[in-house]
Each structure stands twice: as structure tokens, then as C-alpha cells.
Image (cartoon, rainbow, N blue to C red):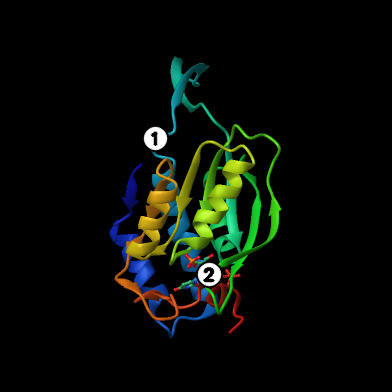
Amino acid sequence: MALHIIDHPLVQHKLSIMRNKETSTMKFRQLLHEISLFMGYEVTRDFPITYEDIETPLQKMRAPKISGKKVVIAPILRAGLGMVDGLTTLIPSARVGHIGMYRDEETCQPVFYYYKMPANKNRLVIVTDPMLATGGSACDAISRLKEDGYKTIRLMCLVASPQGVKAVQEKHPDVDIYLASMDEGLNDKNYILPGLGDAGDRIFGTR
Ligand code: PRP
Ligand code: URA
């Protein structure tokens, strides 16, 4: 499926400020929220439309409304939480699930600790996580969603490595990926280069 890179100048400008190590937690969080709004606009771009008869104060018309699947936003904890408010601002009726996992510091393998999703498996799931590094966390989160019965899944990340994108495309070729940037690669600790550091720590100020 498709790889979408959101190269809008406003997104790229805001991302550059986020990458700067001098940027404060407050500013980082605010910029992630703003970028999530822009990215959400693209993630929802192909949502199907239906037409409804309404009356404006002046005349009747066939008015376009969104139809089709309802949405669940599924942040991978912790950092994915930073992208939720932007999406719920755009899609106020969206449900929000939570996928708790962290990357083991030694092995870099994802470790699950929490999973809570809505009962209706027919919804479109938008998985959020700012960082797609080795791709292990995203691949496992998507596998868990599929085991649970979800069939239509999109992945929205801020920054990715080529290796992470390849891993998701190979394991989950049916999942569309949305990024603000495809970065250069990974360092020897599997951090994205040039990246923006540890996204969870930068959002929550835990470093
Ligand atoms: C980060 C990030 C992703 C994962 C990416 O989370 O938010 O979930 O690492 O790495 P991967 O693609 O190699 O799996 P982290 O484990 O640091 O947890 P946190 O969000 O709680 O800080
Ligand atoms: N997790 C992060 O937060 N940043 C990276 O660069 C890689 C994994």
C-alpha cells in the first residue's frame, strides 16, 4: 500500500523546530499537536462522501457529508499520545484506543504492557507514533490489532527510518503509512538519524 510523505512547507518548518535540541518540552508538544492536524488532513483525504438534502437559509441543496467507516485513533504509548489531540480535533467523534508498549533498551525489541480498544472492529484504525525506527513496535502493534479483528489500519508517524518503513511494508503491505519525514537511517542504538531524539522524553519532559 501507499507511503505518503507530507511535505507541506508548514509541516517541514514545524518539524525542523521540533528537531532542534534547544526546543522546550512545551514548544515540542505544541508543534507535534499542530503537525498532527496537518497530517490528519492527509490521512482523512480519501474518506468517502455521501450527499444529504438540507436547506440553507436561501435554498435547498445536496450537501456533502463524510460517510463510511467510523474511526479509532490508537496511539502507541507513550509518544503516540502526543498526536491524539490533533486528530480528535479533526474527527471529534473518533474513539481512542491505547496500545501500551516500550522498546527494551538492550534488545530494542518491543514489550507489550497494555491494550484497550473499542469493541467495534469495523472501524478504521489510525495508529499514531511519532517515531518509526526499526519498525518493531509498529509491526507488533498492527499485528495485535489484526489478531483482535481490525481490518483497515493506517499508520501515522512523524519521522521514520528507511528500515522501519521497509519492515512495516513487508509485514503489513495492506497498511498505508503517513510520514512527515523519511530520515537517513539509524545509529548503533537504533535511534533515528538525524531524528529528534527520544520522542516520549521530549513530549513528557522525562529526560
Ligand atoms: C519509541 C517510539 C516508538 C518506538 C520506535 O517508544 O515512540 O514506539 O520507540 O522504535 P522501533 O521502531 O525501533 O520499535 P519508546 O519505546 O521509547 O517508548 P516511550 O514512547 O514510552 O518513550
Ligand atoms: N524512539 C525514539 O523516541 N526515537 C528514536 O529515534 C528511536 C526510537
Counting every numbered tag in the picture gives 2
Quarter of image, res 26? bottom right
Which of the marked residues, 1 or 2, is nearer the chain's N terminus? Answer: 2
Question: Taking 39 as reference, is 32 above or below it?
Answer: below
Whether disc 1's CB lies below 8 Å from ligand 1 is answered no
Return the residue nearer the eye: 30 or 63.
30
Please report contact status of discs 1 and 2: CB closer than 8 Å, yes or no.
no
Residue drawn at x 43%, y 75% is 190
**Which residue type carries mark 2?**
Arg
Return the residue nearer the eye: 158 or 174.
174
Question: Taking 92 as reference, is 64 above or below it?
Answer: above
Disc 2 is placed on an element classified as: helix
Mark 1 highlights which residue?
Answer: 46
Say if residue 92 shows up in the picture.
no
Mark 2 highlights which residue?
Answer: 29
Residue drawn at x 57%, y 55% is 84
Return the residue nearer the eye: 81 or 8.
81
Residue drawn at x 44%, y 49% is 171
In front: label 1 or label 2: 1
Say if residue 23 shows up in the picture.
yes
CA neighbours of label 2 inside 10 A, class few (<14), some (14 to 19), many (20+): some
Q: Position of residue 102 (x, y in %)?
A: 60, 68
Question: Taking 53 as reference, is 184 above or below it?
Answer: below
Whether disc 2's CB lies below 8 Å from ligand 1 is answered no
Quarter of image, res 194? bottom left
Residue drawn at x 53%, y 61% is 137
The N terminus lies in quadrant: top left
Return the residue nearer the eye: 187 or 195.
187
**Which residue type carries mark 1?**
Asp
Q: How far, Cα to Cα, is label 1 from label 2? A: 28 Å
